[in-house]
Image (cartoon, helix red, strand yellow):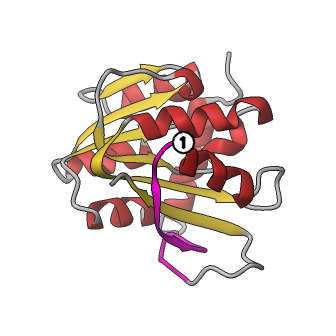
Amino acid sequence: MGQFDGREYQARIDAMVAGGKDVHGEVRLVLGLEPTCVLDAGCGTGRVAIELARDGIEVVGVDVDASMLAEARRRGPGLEWIEADLASLELGRTFDVVLLAGNVPLFCTDSRRHDLVASCARHVRPGGSMVAGFSLGRGYGLESFDASWASAGLELWGRWSTWELDAFAETSDYALTVLRRP
């Protein structure tokens, strides 16, 4: 069993939506990159993948947690969901966008974070993007993250402090990074 109960996790998201919270900043950002195919790496219950698919995007969702994937499959039965460890993922294909939303690197052990970034970067096609958003000050900093994506051949396109593209500052507690493969 994984770290989460997929139904409980999704119930919290549903409650936020019912309370008027916008939970689709990631979707808007990814759609702005105009992809035809997206790898939702660390897809959880499929919140982002399902919304992208509604907009006609081909999406593959990957997560290591069986309970989260069970909920994703229940909510998005026609989509491709894969149970796998992102640090060793090899799908044999590339995508326009590889998305790591929702603190994905923070759920990986310290010793495997570099592998996670490198593995996800291998799935970005030439001219494509990797998008990662995670909280800072929780044991994984931008220096380590930046070294990992740079060694994987990606280039920085932009960095913000929110999915709404608010300016990033050294005091920001969240980093949203958009990278490109030349």
Foreground of the two, 16 or 68: 68
Determine the residue located farthest toward the top in the rendered image: 1
165 vs 56: above or below: below
The reply, left or right, for residue 105 in relation to residue 49 is right
Residue positioned 70% across, 59% down in the render: 142
The reply, left or right, for residue 30 in relation to residue 157 is left
Where residue 110 appears, as percent x and y from the top left, is: 79, 36
Magenta range? 152-166
Query: How many numbered circles are shown?
Result: 1
Where residue 19 appears, as percent x and y from the top left, is: 54, 67
Locate residue 162: give its quadrant.
Answer: bottom right
Where residue 30 appears, as percent x and y from the top left, is: 34, 59
* Residue picked out by circle 1: 10
Where residue 80 appears, as percent x and y from the top left, is: 30, 26
Residue positioned 61% across, 43% down in the render: 104
156 vs 139: above or below: below
Residue positioned 28% across, 61% down in the render: 31
Q: Is residue 133 visible?
A: yes
Foreground of the two, 83 or 50: 83
Locate residue 95: give its quadrant.
Answer: top left
Q: Amino acid at mark 1?
A: Gln
Locate residue 172: give its quadrant.
Answer: bottom right
The reply, left or right, for residue 107 in relation to residue 168 is right
Residue 53 falls inside the magenta stretch: no
Around disc 1, counting alpha carbons within 10 Å, would you say few (fewer than 14), some (14 to 19), or many (20 or more)? some
Residue positioned 55% across, 19% down in the render: 66
Quadrant (top left/top right/bottom left/bottom right) for the N terminus? top right
Quadrant (top left/top right/bottom left/bottom right) for the C terminus? bottom left
Helix, strand or loop status at disc 1: helix
